[in-house]
Each structure stands twice: as C-alpha cells, then as structure tokens.
Image (cartoon, rainbow, N blue to C red):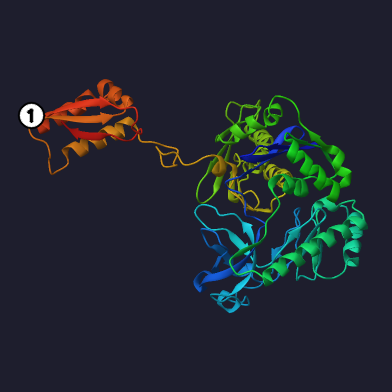
C-alpha cells in the first residue's frame, strides 16, 4: 500500500491528510484560535467529587472543569494498540475503589487530557500519564512493557520485547508501530528523551500552583509525523517553508531514515486541491456517498449514535437477489471503513447492511469489515451481524469529528436537517390569527410578513385559507414577502 502524508500549513490553521493508494483516509485540523488539548499535562485541583457518578471535576485552568472518571485514577494495565495506548485496570465493580476514597476536594495532582471538550462538556483527563515518542510510549510509574498489536510478526515482537526488557526499569514502555525494525540505539535515545521529559514535568510540579499547564503536546504537524509516519511511507509533502524546516529538524533528530522522504511542495495549485483532498472533505460533509455500482451509503449522525445505511440504489444485479445484496454489501465495506476514518466518527456506530439470508454471506461480510477496520489506528470493538443485518461498533473518540469541526447546526432547522412544510406553517399562522383573545378590530388591515414560498403556496394551493380567516374576523389580511425570514417563521403586524 502506498502511503503519503500531506501538510497544509497556514497562519490560521494547519491541516494534515493521510493518503493510502492516492485516496484520502484521514484529515486532521488544528486552528490557531482553538488548539487541541489532548496530550497536554496539567497540575489540577479537584473542584468537586461526584460519588453518584464515580467521577470528579478537576480545575486545570480552562473555562470548563475537566472530568475525571474513577477508572482514570486506577493504575493502568498495558494492552497496547497501534498507538501504544493503555487500557484501565479491569476490576469487578464490587472490588473497584470509590472515587471519594481516591480523591478529595481541594487535592492537587498531575493529570493528562485524553479527550477534548465535546458537545458542551469539559475535557476528560486521566491521572495515568503517557508520554509518546517516536518508537516508545513511556508510562511513568508503571512496571510493565508492551508491543503494539499492529506489529504482527512474532519474531519481530520477540526481538522488540528483548530490547524493552533490557531498558532500565524506571517505568513502563510500549513499543509503537513505528518501532518495527528499530535498533536498540534508537530505543535507548527515545527512552532517554522521554524520561528526561518526565523529570522536567515533575520538577515543574514542585514550583507550580494548581491549576497550571506543565507540558504542552506537540503541534499538529510534528505530532502527525511522530504518530502516523512509518517506514513504509512514500513521502511527506509540506507546502510551507517554515514548517518544512521544523519537520526536517525533527526527523533528523528522531527518525533520520525518514528525513529524505520529506518534500517541500512548491506548485502554484494548493496542495489539497492537487491531491484531491478538498473534494474529499466536501464529500465527507454530505450524508450520501455514491458507490461505483449505483448503490450508496448514507451517514447520519445523532446525539446518541451514528447510523450508516447501505442501499442498492440503481444497482439491480443480474439474476439472484441474495447475490445482488451480497455484492452491494461487499462493495460498501471498504468505503464505509474509509468514511468512518475520514469523518473520524466515534462513540456508538450502527451499520445497517442490506439483509442477507445466507449465514455464510453474513460471516464473510463481518470478517471483511473487521479486516478493513483493522487498518484504523483508533481503538474499536464490534459485534457480529445481527438478525436484522446490523453491525454495532464502538470507536474511540478523543477529538471532535470532521462534521462538528467544520459545520454548525442550521439556524433554520435547529440542526434537525428538516423544516416545516408550507402547509404546516400556513395552518399554524391561521391558528395564531384566530387564537383567543382576538386582538383585531373589525375592518382593520392585518399585515403578515411571510416567506415568498408561502405566498405562492397560499395563492396556488390554499387560496381559501386566509379568506376564511378574514371572513371570520371581519378584517383584511395582507401578505408581505420577506426573504430574510427563516422558512418556518412568519410575523403578524397590525396596520
């Protein structure tokens, strides 16, 4: 698979796109006015303990307090994924300590942001620090080692384990996906950098008063090269000279073999336009994604979950309905997996595949879908195809997805995606005019400001509606068009 990383850096924002075989699979944004918090380390102060939720609010110096779950105070167990992250220790609910036994109001301690503020909630934090390097993730206070699950070669895993076991045991270490093929010297250099960074952070604690920022995560350009680029990348293309110079210095220090793959993009056409990323972003903001056969995928995000529906559309197959359905589902699998990554959909996802009667087809769809999702660096869990053709997935969410980042709720429909019909608005207007107590005097003119479409509807489809109101009240009703009104609004004005 051919992989490329594109970095579009401008003063207001930095954008990064990950391409696989020429197609965009991930897009990351960071704006100067709204930088991400994930990875930042703070000295926090417990503001409030909530025993009923087994959580606490922690002040870290932001507008909203951070949220700390009881699981994020307990020591972690290493169960590394492609990013070298950890899972919380698994304890039975009855054996798990209570949040009010672990933290007290006014207590100060070091926390790290694991999830940005989303949907009006404050950021989520953990007391278990993890410091990522190029080849290693360092876990201060943990005496374990782990290997990224994305490294599947058993001989390589054993080689890496031996290297990790030989490192001085002053904390836990996880070999990241990029560690594959790395030498002992590279691990030693990464370990030295990360342990020195941890020492600086804890020394800063001694001279700081909560709430205080102790460590800021790398900016998007450096972070993306550190976390995404592996030895099989073909190129890293950057369109800004200053960012190119910083990345060159960074790669020279942490990954010299990759430095020669860094390119400065000099063409006049914008880099995201040249490589088709802008078109992919626009497509990802639409709900419907066409498939080559004529079928389609529909993505609908709600507060509770993300629903993804597969339709045959214009594709009618050749002979057998089951084969037509099966073919459409197989065609949709890689595109659904790509859209999940591209849109960065997180939380609960429900994928509605077209119903298949053949159990073998269901198993194959599940297996292929699981394999496609396995390319994703975010953690996920999925359940087998249900009787109704549904696959339920939970996917890690640490930042706002593409839709929430680039769009806002429609002021006309309140974010529902639907507005009232002209007939509904006309009937509401009729009820408002006739509602007691009647405020109009017989013979007067009542002016109603409405959208042009409502004027046309009343003239062409319901001409008697306002005539009936005028006769009942003994007034004259005059419609005035106002294009500035939202579609479902009208204003009644007495002359």
- Is residue 375 at least partly visible in the picture? no
Q: Quadrant of residue 61?
A: bottom right
**Residue shown at 80% from the left, 64% from the top:** 196
From the image, which quarter does the N terminus lie in? top right
Residue 478 place in picture, x, y as percent: 19, 26
Which one is nearer the viewer's eye here, 267 or 384?
267
What residue is disc 1 on?
443
| Whether residue 7 can be seen here | yes
Q: Quadrant of residue 165?
A: bottom right
Which residue is depicted at the point 74% across and 60% down?
Answer: 131
Front in this rendered view, residue 135 or 487: 135
- Looking at the image, residue 255 sits to the left or right of residue 434; the answer is right
| Residue that protrudes farthest toward the bottom in the picture | 101
- Outermost residue, front direction? 207
Residue at point 70%, 63% (across, down): 87
Residue 268, above or below 354: above
The spot of residue 402 in percent (x, y) is 59, 42
Answer with left or right where residue 491 lies relative to residue 93: left
- Judge left or right: residue 385 versus residue 4: left
**Left or right, residue 299 beside residue 255:** left
Q: Residue furthest left?
A: 442
Q: Is residue 245 above or below residue 203?
A: above
Q: Position of residue 4 (x, y in %)?
A: 78, 37
Rendering coords of residue 383 (x, y %): 65, 53
Between 131 and 23, the one nearer to me in the picture: 131
Quarter of the rendering occupied by the C terminus: top left
Where disc 1 sits, the SS reads loop
Mark 1 neighbour density, 10 Å: few (under 14) some (14–19) many (20 or more): few
């Amino acid at each position: 698979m051919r992989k490329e990383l594109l970095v579009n850096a401008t003063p207001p924002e930095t954008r990064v796109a990950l391409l696989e075989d020429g197609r965009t699979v991930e897009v990351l944004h960071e704006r100067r006015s709204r930088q991400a918090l994930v990875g930042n380390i703070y000295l926090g102060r417990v503001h409030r303990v909530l025993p009923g939720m087994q959580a606490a609010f922690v002040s870290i110096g932001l507008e909203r307090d951070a949220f700390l779950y009881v699981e994020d105070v307990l020591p972690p167990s290493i169960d590394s994924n492609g990013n070298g992250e950890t899972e919380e220790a698994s304890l039975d609910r009855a054996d798990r300590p209570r949040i009010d036994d672990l933290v007290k109001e006014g207590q100060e301690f070091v926390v790290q942001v694991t999830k940005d503020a989303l949907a009006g909630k404050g950021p989520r934090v953990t007391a278990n620090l993890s410091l990522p390097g190029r080849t290693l993730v360092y876990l201060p206070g943990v005496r374990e080692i782990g290997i990224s699950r994305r490294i599947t070669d058993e001989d390589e895993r054993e080689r890496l384990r031996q290297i990790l076991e030989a490192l001085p045991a002053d904390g836990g270490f996880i070999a990241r996906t990029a560690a594959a093929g790395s030498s002992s010297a590279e691990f030693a250099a990464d370990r030295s950098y990360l342990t020195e960074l941890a020492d600086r952070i804890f020394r800063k604690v001694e001279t700081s008063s909560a709430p205080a920022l102790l460590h800021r995560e790398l900016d998007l350009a450096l972070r993306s090269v550190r976390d995404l680029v592996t030895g099989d990348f073909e190129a890293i293309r950057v369109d800004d000279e200053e960012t190119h110079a910083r990345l060159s210095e960074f790669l020279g220090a942490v990954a010299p073999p990759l430095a020669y793959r860094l390119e400065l993009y000099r063409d006049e056409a914008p880099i995201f336009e040249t490589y088709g990323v802008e078109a992919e972003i626009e497509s990802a903001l639409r709900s419907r994604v066409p498939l080559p056969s004529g079928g389609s995928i529909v993505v609908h995000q709600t507060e509770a979950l993300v629903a993804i529906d597969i339709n045959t559309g214009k594709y009618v197959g050749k002979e057998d309905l089951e084969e037509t359905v099966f073919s459409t589902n197989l065609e949709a699998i890689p595109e659904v997996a790509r859209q999940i990554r591209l849109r960065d959909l997180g939380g609960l996802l429900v994928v509605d595949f077209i119903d298949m009667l053949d159990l073998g087809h269901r198993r194959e769809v599940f297996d292929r879908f699981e394999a496609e999702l396995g390319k994703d660096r975010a953690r996920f869990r999925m359940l087998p195809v249900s009787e109704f053709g549904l696959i339920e997935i939970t996917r890690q969410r640490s930042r706002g997805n593409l839709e929430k980042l680039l769009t806002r709720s429609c002021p006309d429909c309140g974010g529902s995606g639907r507005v009232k019909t002209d007939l509904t608005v006309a009937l509401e207007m009729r009820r408002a005019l006739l509602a007691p107590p009647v405020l109009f005097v017989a013979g007067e003119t009542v002016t109603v400001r409405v959208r042009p479409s409502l004027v046309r509807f009343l003239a062409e489809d319901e001409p008697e509606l306002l005539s009936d109101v005028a006769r009942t009240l003994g007034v004259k009703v005059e419609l005035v068009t106002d294009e500035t009104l939202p579609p479902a609004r009208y204003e009644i004005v007495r002359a």
